[in-house]
Image (cartoon, grey):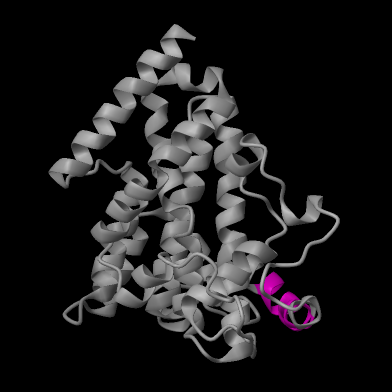
Amino acid sequence: MKDFESQARAFGEQIEAEIAEGHLSFPTSLDVSLRIKRLADSPASSLEEIAAAVKTEPVLSAKTVRMANAVTLNPYATPITNVADAVRRIGLASLRCLAFAVAAEQLAQDHRSPKMRTIASGLWMHSVDVAAWSCAIARELRTVNPDTAMFAGMMTDIGQFLLLARAADYPALAEDLPRFAEFVTTWNTPVSQSVLEVFELPEEILDAFEHGAPCAGSWPPASLAAILFVATHAVDTPNPFDKLMGLKHRTDLPDSAIPGIDQRNLDHLLESTRENRQLILAALCG
């Protein structure tokens, strides 16, 4: 365990120094996602420039075209065969989310440690599940922009993703996964805040991550924070770090109610949005 302790200490010191300097190091795949987001955010960017950036990432290109042909975005089944038309069809908000989903999936697949790769895969599935539920619930309630909700949902585990990716430089951390989960839990909040600042997200999204239980005492969910709260509890896929920490997922509990929410109201909302969530999930995973 000595190697674990020394590498965990070195990793923590490195992360602390980078946060203090304001220069958190990103894996290459997240750099591509950030570049596409900044292009999509800029009024000066043309569709051709954005499409060209997407084309530099073959997997993202293929998934953008596939998403554009999904039934939720292409109900008349008009074939979309090129990236520019696909970007136009899905919209820039969905493209931002898809770019991050692809980056996170690549992080999950590229990890050197098989044990860490399994965790990364589970974390990716948890993120897209939260994103799909967030978007579906927002569409149903019409209180929050669905694209904003989807992107915010995809960013829920961003700090854990970065820590997991960077842990590849500290192989001894894979020797004790429960202790690594404790390490990730310790650093998740400051790392998440730093990444969200780098991504220059709007205040609406930043504020949504600062609430504990925003639904308590009110229904239906009216804010982005409340929708994320419900979506995080609704997911079928547990966060692998929670499991390593011994925290039970709602599907493992005899009572799956969310504190402060009437179970009948929750069941009705989830049932009415489940099919839409499945279509969005398929579009993100396709």
Q: Residue furthest top?
A: 2
Q: Which residues are magenta?
A: 268-279
Decide which of 141, 112 is in the foreground and name it. 141
Q: Residue furthest left?
A: 21
Residue 171, given in percent of the width and then of the height, sits at 44, 19
Whether residue 86 is visible to the viewer of this picture, yes or no, is no
Determine which quarter of the picture holds residue 151.
bottom left
Residue 96, given in percent of the width and then of the height, sits at 39, 68
Residue 19, given in percent of the width and then of the height, sits at 22, 43
Q: State the predominant SS element of the stretch in magenta.
A: helix
Q: Residue at x 34, y 57 (%)?
A: 33
Q: Is residue 279 above or below residue 269?
A: above
Whether residue 39 is visible to the viewer of this picture, yes or no, is yes
Question: Seen in the image, is 146 located left or right of residue 24?
Answer: right
Q: Is residue 211 above or below residue 196?
A: below
Q: Residue at x 16, y 47 (%)?
A: 22
The answer to whether residue 276 is magenta is yes
